[in-house]
Amino acid sequence: MPAVSKGDGMRGLAVFISDIRNCKSKEAEIKRINKELANIRSKFKGDKALDGYSKKKYVCKLLFIFLLGHDIDFGHMEAVNLLSSNKYTEKQIGYLFISVLVNSNSELIRLINNAIKNDLASRNPTFMCLALHCIANVGSREMGEAFAADIPRILVAGDSMDSVKQSAALCLLRLYKASPDLVPMGEWTARVVHLLNDQHMGVVTAAVSLITCLCKKNPDDFKTCISLAVSRLSRIVSSASTDLQDYTYYFVPAPWLSVKLLRLLQCYPPPEDAAVKGRLVECLETVLNKAQEPPKSKKVQHSNAKNAILFETISLIIHYDSEPNLLVRACNQLGQFLQHRETNLRYLALESMCTLASSEFSHEAVKTHIDTVINALKTERDVSVRQRAADLLYAMCDRSNAKQIVSEMLRYLETADYAIREEIVLKVAILAEKYAVDYSWYVDTILNLIRIAGDYVSEEVWYRVLQIVTNRDDVQGYAAKTVFEALQAPACHENMVKVGGYILGEFGNLIAGDPRSSPPVQFSLLHSKFHLCSVATRALLLSTYIKFINLFPETKATIQGVLRAGSQLRNADVELQQRAVEYLTLSSVASTDVLATVLEEMPPFPERESSILAKLKRKKGPGAGSALDDSRRDPSSNDINGGVEPTPSTVSTPSPSADLLGLRAAPPPAAPPATSGAGNLLVDVFSDGPAAQPSLGPTPEEAFLSELEPPAPESPMALLADPAPAADPGPDDIGPPIPEADELLNKFVCKNNGVLFENQLLQIGVKSEFRQNLGRMYLFYGNKTSVQFQNFSPTVVHPGDLQTQLAVQTKRVAAQVDGGAQVQQVLNIECLRDFLTPPLLSVRFRYGGAPQSLTLKLPVTINKFFQPTEMAAQDFFQRWKQLSLPQQEAQKIFKANHPMDAEVTKAKLLGFGSALLDNVDPNPENFVGAGIIQTKALQVGCLLRLEPNAQAQMYRLTLRTSKEPVSRHLCELLAQQF
Amino acid sequence: MQFMLLFSRQGKLRLQKWYISLSDKEKKKITRELVQTILARKPKMCNFLEWRDLKIVYKRYASLYFCCAIEDQENELITLEIIHRYVELLDKYFGSVCELDIIFNFEKAYFILDEFLLGGEVQETSKKNVLKAIEQADLLQEVSYSTSLLY
């Protein structure tokens, strides 16, 4: 039982809570709750004369049940009734219920708003505050519409009580945050600013929050707040610790208000008025001075409140970034905190110093703390503090200390927490590139990264090292030598094999003169890793091998032998099989010249924002850009290390490194000019997806492949298709289709092209064509953001029996979709037999670290496989009669949803797929159509008749087919179109 | 502040206050995630952590954890003292407050919070003023108002 039962004890409630607490199991608890819910429901339903106390008690019980985590779907009306009770506690409980369990039922909202309106007009401050609290707690747009205009009036009215003003200010703040358009600016704004002068500290505290929020959008309207805020702050800072009575907190005068005022000042540049500025600087100095004074209390509350003001002061100093003296003092203060025994202070000091490091005035001062920070990285026991230390090292890094910082970070990486390894890897990779004076150091560092934390080296990082090596011929020989040595380790990470494979394929010739790394040695070293690697790496190595044939003709026979081996040519993986087949043919049919042209050294990559930097920014949000600030401060770094030219524009084309590895569907960035024959060959070798040709015939690459007669007797279509449909996630693994899925699907019943789906992140376009029982669909996934999507995987799922009715083969698409880029996916579709439900398209990806998933219905409906049939009236009626069994007919009478226009209707029916037959129906207003649905297993003849009734705005649609479910299904599909 | 959660060492949620609009499903997900994260932390660790794009400030008082989510530019230390002041208010009102008081009088815990914080911002920092408002309400509890009297 409760220790105290203050206020109005509700015995029934206390007993119920005790019961719940005594429940031994979850099941018992649910049972008890269900019993109570039944009881309350019957009380609410049955006894009309339920008194206010009981109503309050039951509403309170419902609230308790809801807060335990159970759903509550009734009681709202009773709670609304309590709002108009004339007993305070009943009203209060009613408001609490409404605040916690908002319901968007419009009738209820009208009643709630009515009750609030009455209370706001009541002139009873306690009631007014309750109503304002409710608005602030709910903060919905509906409430904004109803009250946003009234609240400013209450806020600045001369006769409003202080407590009402406080609630009104914060209530308005919440409404403004939710729907800024609803809060009208006006003459009240000037009066709000003057609340900063109010005698009541509570009113000032509430008003500052409101002004801070409003002035961000309308800085000029609130400009006068600067001088008022400064003078208020100055009065607080200079007051003795007891002056402010109850607003003093553990000997610190008005800490909350001080922090809020300092935050408000951060919305503006330094004050222009010299007197105001002088006074402010004095305040800031006072705060810094006080930090050096002995504490007035040993309580942690005292030091926290004092330091909260200090940190906010430092934030303001950093924000102004114009007072070198204050910046250096701030830095020294933070330096003291770096070794404080309070973990919280060390954490905050590291965090705050990160921003100081990017100021030109304090960068050097921050750098003096490097040893302390490195020590923190090694010894802090809390991972979140170590993370801050790593952030700070990154922020304070420049050319003078880069080698030290990078080597410390590498050392830390060996024992670092798994949670932050990837980030450290990215940071090391960026710093190594940015501050590399000689590129051999850069190459060493990246290879070290792979050695120490290979699993955390993302594609971006090793793509980047390849780009840099490709672009800088002074480091290519060194890189080749170093990877060759690294690959000799008995166990080396797969990423090392990838980098090694690529670099040796391009630049292996630079070390081939040394007998210890002669071509055959290089090849056998790489090939010794081959069998342990994943498919993607093996695919890359196969490309290296064909490059070796070009670079080192003496390896041709050995490599052809490898390519010819059954394990390659008959590999279960189509990608490997295709590469082996194509490379083998290329090496045997192409002349040396053609081979040299096709396999020419990669052209330099265009300079653009480093993809690693972009990745780090995505991981860390805008704050991670401090490396960018560095390069702004140190423009010379751009000249030497052009690779990280910071451009604000985002990468809009797929990363070129993706192309160079030949694993992506996009063509290579720069196809060297060649004879037309060789040009075709190039496409065939490098593109592993069909080009966007809307043709159903075999595409050139299919022909190329079929001429080769691949040893695995598979159809050319299957070769291009995803080899493992069985690996697709089952329907259990994907979410249900989005609510609009059916509506989106309906849009495509009568058309084949268009935008299937669009939200803020993603656009999915469709282009499809169907012939007989076959179809090909192109899906275009457009990334609408400026940030790369990762782990992008669209899959097609066949729920239920669909697997046996419809075959859909998909090509895999690139796992990354760059900001602004579009990727294409090709689907080959075969209708095996009639089907009712469309396949599902499940799209999953990570956007800025957050997983996104989306399930749509693929616009493949049975009518897509319609073949129109022309026939004369006589034939039509004869067949119509043949299909007269009741189950063969489906009919629907429905209201027109769109204007009844004969031309539009015609177009829709044609789009639906049937032929339109003129002069069949005696009534010229009616439409008659015929067609055959083509499936692999059977054909279904269909006849349809649509009778519009313009007067009643109705249609009657009749379908007759030889198969009962088809009639019904077509009828349903078509009826939704008009 | 975006939200405040109170939960026990066993992970039971005792109070939740949301200053942003979220679906019930999302609220439950956030709660589950944070309760797990915080309960897994060791006692001497710092009271702040980064979570999604928010900062979490939490502190344990006896068997209860108080946890606030604040935005990037908000002040961690002052938030820590918001928590402390709220605990003081509860303590003063209930007289050496314990978890049971909050369980059995959850509605009072909400009322006190509303007087102290509104829309995620500190409304009134004076302990006296907050408690005065609550006590006034308690006095009013069974007094009947006839609406006509108010005009």
Image: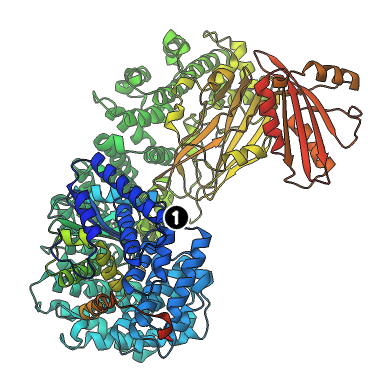
Q: Measured from the top left, where is residue B124 in percent x and y?
A: 28, 77
- What kind of residue is marked 1? Pro
Residue visible at 31% across and 90% down in the picture: A199
In the image shown, does A214 or A465 lie closer to the viewer?
Answer: A214
**Count of numbered labels shown in the rendering:** 1
* Position above or below: A937 against B23: above
Quadrant in which the C terminus of chain B is drawn: bottom left
Quadrant in which the N terminus of chain B is drawn: bottom left
Q: Measured from the top left, where is residue B144 in percent x and y?
A: 33, 78
Q: In the displayed structure, does residue A306 sit left or right of residue A690?
A: left
Colour scheme in use? rainbow
In the image shown, does B130 or A857 lie closer to the viewer?
Answer: B130
Binning the other alpha carbons within 10 Å of mark 1 as few (below 14), some (14 to 19) or many (20 upward) gives: many
Quarter of the rendering containing residue A96: bottom left
Instruction: Tell me if I can see residue A192 in this picture.
Output: no
The answer for which chain carries disc 1 is A
Q: Measured from the top left, where is residue A842 in percent x and y?
A: 50, 34
Quarter of the rendering containing residue A638: bottom left
In the image shown, does A607 or A611 lie closer to the viewer?
Answer: A611
Local SS, label 1: loop
Q: Measured from the top left, where is residue A289 in percent x and y?
A: 17, 81
Q: In the displayed structure, does residue A69 sit left or right of residue A801?
A: left
Residue located beneath label 1 in the image:
A646
In the image shown, does A300 or A295 lie closer to the viewer?
Answer: A300
Q: In the displayed structure, does residue A53 sit left or right of residue B149?
A: left
Residue visible at 49% across and 81% down in the picture: A220
Instruction: Tell me if I can see residue A258 in this picture.
Output: yes
Residue visible at 27% across and 51% down in the picture: B34
Q: In the displayed structure, does residue A103 sit left or right of residue A652?
A: left
